[in-house]
Image: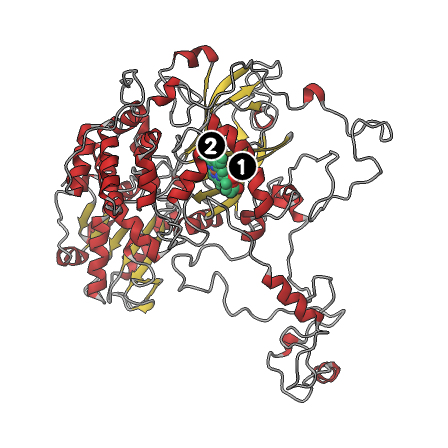
Amino acid sequence: GDETLAAEMPFNSTKPLEYGEAAYTPHKGETHTPPTPIATASTCTETVASEKVGDGQPDIGDNAINRPLDRVRVDDTGRELTTNQGVPVADNQNSLKAGLRGPTLMEDFILREKLTHFDHERIPERAVHARGSAAHGYFESYEDLRAITRAAPFAAAGKRTPVFVRFSTVAGERGSADTVRDVRGFAVKFYTDDGNWDLVGNNIPVFFIQDAMKFPDLVHAVKPEPHHAMPQASSAHDTFWDFASLSPEIAHMLMWQTSDRAIPRSYRMMQGFGVHTFRLVNDKGASLFCKFHWTPMAGTHSLVWDEAVRIAGADPDYHRRDLWEAIDSGQFPEWELGLQLFTEEQAAQFPFDILDPTKIVPEELVPVRPVGKMVLDRNPDNFFAETEQAAFCAAQVVPGIDFTNDPLLQGRLHSYIDTQITRLGGPNFHEIPINTPVAQIHNNQREGFHRQQINRGRVNYEPNSLAGGCPFQAGARGFVSVPEPSQGNEVRGKPELFADHYSQARLFWVSQSAVEQRHIIDAFRFELTRVQTPAVRSRVLALLLNIDERLAGAVADGLGMVLPPPLPLSSDNPPHDYQPSPALSLFARPGALGVRTRRVAWMVGQGAEGGQVRKLYAALLDAGAVPRLISARIGPLATSDDAPLDVEISFETGPSVLWDGVIVADSPVFVGDAQALEFLRLQYQHDKPILALGNGAELLKAAKIPRKPDPGVIVAESADAEAALASFKEMLARHRVYARERA
Ligand code: HDD
């Protein structure tokens, strides 16, 4: 009972307990009843957008990789608090003192251990791609591809290989906003039967530079400027554009980076690319060149720029939250893996060099062959242990996959392992559970900081006889490099075709729709307006002139500048005239998700048609969308039928930019008109579908939103609400009403 417990405590015995009985329990042998939680994921409603998703309990999926991870997964339920040595801790609130008002004692090993651990809890962030989010899942092969590659994931139709996938921005620091204009990292770790294969790609199929020699300069230029550490997570500053304007090989990448690809709506709605040309090799040693493509089931969709900027303030975790909630609610994101396969002979005919990472292989030249799908079905349990400690490495390939001489790739083969030695503190980072292969590790590497394996026996060398020659070389079963002949003098330089910097930049430009082209012009204007040095702006215009005159002219116009002469070309060869490639438009992949996971704000006011709201709300939920009732404040709201509606989100915590579309309920009065009008105005400005029912149309009028002609503004009488909702869902599934921008 209480008296015995209190009597057993050697300190503060006369003072009433500050922390209640929970601080005493459990004693050895007793069961612990956890105190009633003050807040859980399901009771907290005021957090931005993450209300009501999931039950806050870990969801134990069945990915093979999660089984080895279970060894180190910790659940504290019903356990007593201990030190790192497993010693039960009696009091976690007070340090050990010589008298209640006396000095703290050195002897307090519990205090010292706790503080020491805390003092060392931070590790360096990634040099690039510091900001990211990850999830577990699996890859499933559609077919037996052994004729093409011995890579284990493709060995049979239906074969599943566990994966861990991390998405990221490049330039921003660990705490920076998700929706900045940037390339997104798309790194996939396959835990294959033959060891780990990391496909460390991006959401853009080309890169800024052609040679790893320039990587540190590129990154220094784009990161915050070194004297004052500004700007955060943005390329819109002088040093980046100075570097860009002096590196014409960047031309193609600039087109992608100023396009809406660089402001995706969701990690789930972007493509992924291996970027470099790789090789696939079969068990006879025959190889084909290969480009890897990930195509999202949800389609490729982006934000509009003004929306992206505002989201950075409203919810800097926008992409992280979106990925987490989709998985938590069972809407597992999926991508199809496609391969572009081609031979050495084909490659020799291409008008570009396949070793040049600033070039794509147009899909019209080599179609993308779908070979499998990837499903992300489980959130990590612990961000640090899994997402932060995940170490991806472009050099981690498995038998059946090989590199090419792409000089950017070759440099990467060195950099990734090297960086982990600083970031994760030593050569044994492969033993951190998230990085450990499912395949067993047997070699004679030993020791180093934080060694986990306990290797048995006295033999740690090879060849040996004392351990019967084990572990023995795998021979033909092991990784065998493609015996590519190589000859030539040692030389620092590039092949001639690498110097064609503009043909594919132009290909991208001419393949974009009118709206996409306008967004590219706007992005250049924004970025260059931020640049303070006129000569830098001018050099960028000179570069753009080699891509397209109209583009250069429009950007110059936006800057109030006259066009300079074009940059001199670096090659005597005439540029190659590509046919437009429709596959390069974002609109080429609308996706098959419909309205699933689309966030719909449902504006309700006093006296709203309660019955109608409840019915349509349920229909939208059934369709997999994410509707939420929004008004000036949360809590019960009186309706027409005496049963109050429960308003879930306020305009303050769920501003307009966090929603894909809005429904204005039939309500006689709208509380907080100013906020409601601002909300609607931005929905309209950001090309989102708007449905106004009954008296809700008055709010549209007040916000001066034109009723016609606009396919995305639907006004209907309450009696026609169901048909109107159907049209609204169609618009919502199409993502944004870009036609509005032409008006
Ligand atoms: Fe890199 C991280 C993708 C060129 C050096 N890179 C990193 C990540 C991605 C990429 C997705 C984050 C992985 C994660 O989530 O942990 N990088 C690319 C792509 C490139 C590329 C698609 C060009 C095709 N990278 C590149 C070059 C170098 C590096 C040329 C250096 C020679 N990259 C690194 C790095 C990072 C990294 C410094 C930082 C943290 C890390 O590796 O683990 O080593």
At label 2, which amino acid type do we have?
A: Ala
Find out whether the residues at labels 2 and 1 contact each other: C-beta distance under 8 Å: yes
- Taking 218 as reference, is 230 above or below it? below
- Taking 40 as reference, is 717 above or below it? above
- Taking 663 as reference, is 221 above or below it? above
> Which percent across, then down, holds residue 36?
56, 70
Side (left or right) of 522 relative to 473: left
At label 1, which amino acid type do we have?
A: Ser
Is any part of residue 515 visible from this angle?
Answer: yes
Q: Quadrant of the N terminus?
A: bottom right
> Which percent across, then down, holds residue 668?
19, 64
Side (left or right) of 415 relative to 698: right
Few, some or many C-alpha atoms within 10 Å of disc 2 (few <14, some 14-19, many ≥20)? some
**Helix, strand, or loop for circle 2?**
helix
Whole-number angstrom distance, CA of label 2 to CA of label 1:
9 Å
Q: Quadrant of residue 738 in the image? A: top left
Q: Quadrant of the C terminus?
A: top left
Label 2 C-beta lies within 8 Å of the nearest ligand 1 atom: yes
Report the front residue among 631 and 225.
225
> How are the residues colored?
secondary structure
In the drawing, what numbered circle is on residue 212? 2
Q: Quadrant of residue 703 in the image? A: bottom left
Outermost residue on the bottom side: it is 14
Outermost residue on the right side: it is 466
In the drawing, what numbered circle is on residue 415? 1
